[in-house]
Image (cartoon, rainbow, N blue to C red):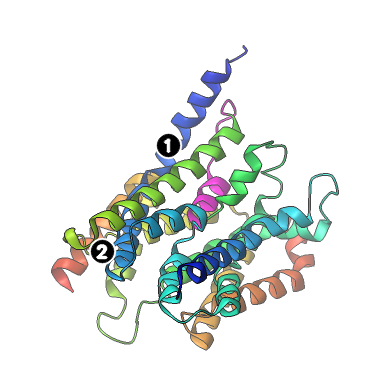
Amino acid sequence: MQQSKKEIIKKAFVSAFPYTIPIFAGFWFLGIAYGIYMNVSGFSFVYPMIMSIVIYGGSLEFIAVSMLLSPFAPVQVFVMTLMIQARHLFYGIAMLDKFKNMGWKKFYLIFGLCDETFSINYTAEIAEDVDRGWFYFFVTLLDHLYWFSGAAIGGLLGNLIQFNTEGLDFVMIAMFVVIFLEQWLKEKHHFSAWIGFISGVACLVLFGGDSFLVPTMICILVCLSWFRKPIEKEGGIV
Amino acid sequence: MTVTQQIITIALCVLGTMLTRFLPFLIFNESRGTPSYIQYLGKVLPGAIFSMLIVYCFRNVSFLQYSYGLPELLSVSAVIILHCYKRNMLLSIAGGTICYMLLVQLVF
C-alpha cells in the first residue's frame, strides 16, 4: 500500500518523538543553565540564542563563554575547538552508511550530529515501515530546538530563575548509560566496549578531565586497528 | 574584546565544530566508496564510543573526596537494574534521575 508523503512524515515524527523526551529534559536543564551563565557573565540573550543554533555543541559553548571574556586569541580558540569536538569524527565514520542516499536532509543531519543525537540515531530500532531519513531528521531537529529554546529562555530570564532542581543534569548520564546497555546487549562480543572503557579510564587518570578525550580516541584507534584480525575473526560486532 | 573579535571567535567555534562533523563525509563520499578499513571502523567504533561517553560523563566526579562518587554509582546501578528488569528506556532514565536527585538533595 502506498503511503502519502504526509503520512510518511507524520509516522516518522510520531516514532521519533518518544526517543527525544529524555533529551528534552536534559537539554532544557543544561540549555537554561547555559543561558543563565551567559546572562550573568554580561552577555545579551542574543548570544546564547545564536550560539546554540550555529555551534550546537554543549560543552564547547560553555567554554566559549570564558573564551569570549578573555583577550582575543583566534588560533587558541580554533585549536581548542578541534580538541573538544574531535569525537565527532568518530560519529561521522559510524554514520557513513546510515546517512547514504538521504538527499537534502543529509547536510542538516551532519550539521546537527551532537553526542545525544548521534547516540539515538545510531542505536534506535526504527520499524520497517518508518522512513529512516525522516526519523533521523526529526530526532536531529527536535534536539536542536530543545537546546535552542533552553538557551534562549536562560538568556532571557537570567538570574530570575531559582534553581531547586539539583541533580537533574543526571538525566543525560542516565541516557548514555541506557544507550550503552542497549549496545552492550546487542553485541556478540564486547572487545570494542572494553577497549573504549579501559582507554578512557587510563587516559582520564593520566591526562585529567579537561584533556583526556583526544588521547582516548588515539588509544581506541590504535587498539581497534591492532586487533582488527581477531575482532573480524569473531564475526564482527553486531 | 570588540564585537568583531567576538564574531570571529564564535565563527571559529562553528568552523572547528563543523569540520569535525563533516570531514568523514567529505573524505569518504558516496560516489568514491569507503575503504574496508574505514568500514571496519564504522562497525566497531560505536561500541568503544559509548564506553568513552560514559567515562566522559564521569570526568568531573571526584572518587577520592566526599561523596566518593557514591550518588553517581548508586544511581547508575539503579538505571542498570531498572533497564535489565523492564527494558523501558524512559522508565530507566527517569528512575535513575529521580534516584540521583533524592540522593544529592537529601542524603549526601
Viewer-side residue, A213 vs A51: A51
Residue lying at 43% horizontally and 68% vertically, measured from the top left: B57
Q: Which residue is mark 2?
A: A167
**Horizontal side, residue A100 vs residue A74: left or right:** right
Residue A80 location (% of width, % of height): 56, 76
Residue lying at 70% horizontally and 50% vertically, measured from the top left: A96
Q: Looking at the picture, does residue A84 appear above or below residue A208?
A: above
Viewer-side residue, A107 vs A26: A107
Instruction: Indicate the chain on which mark 2 is placed.
Output: A
In reply to whether residue B37 is colored magenta, the answer given is no
Viewer-side residue, B1 vs A164: B1
Q: Which residue is mark 1?
A: A17
The answer to whether marks 1 and 2 sit on the same chain is yes
For numbered disc 2, what is the local secondary structure? loop
How crowded is the residue under tag 2: few (<14 C-alpha within 10 Å), some, or many (20+)?
Answer: some
How crowded is the residue under tag 1: few (<14 C-alpha within 10 Å), some, or many (20+)?
Answer: some
Q: Looking at the picture, does residue A75 appear above or below residue A24?
A: below
**Horizontal side, residue A108 vs residue A152: left or right:** right
Magenta stretch in the rendered image? A115-130
Q: Quadrant of residue A63?
A: bottom left
CA gap between label 1 and label 2 equals: 24 Å
Which quarter shows the N terminus of chain A? top right
For badge 1, the amino acid type reads Phe
Residue A121 location (% of width, % of height): 55, 46
Q: Residue furthest top?
A: A1
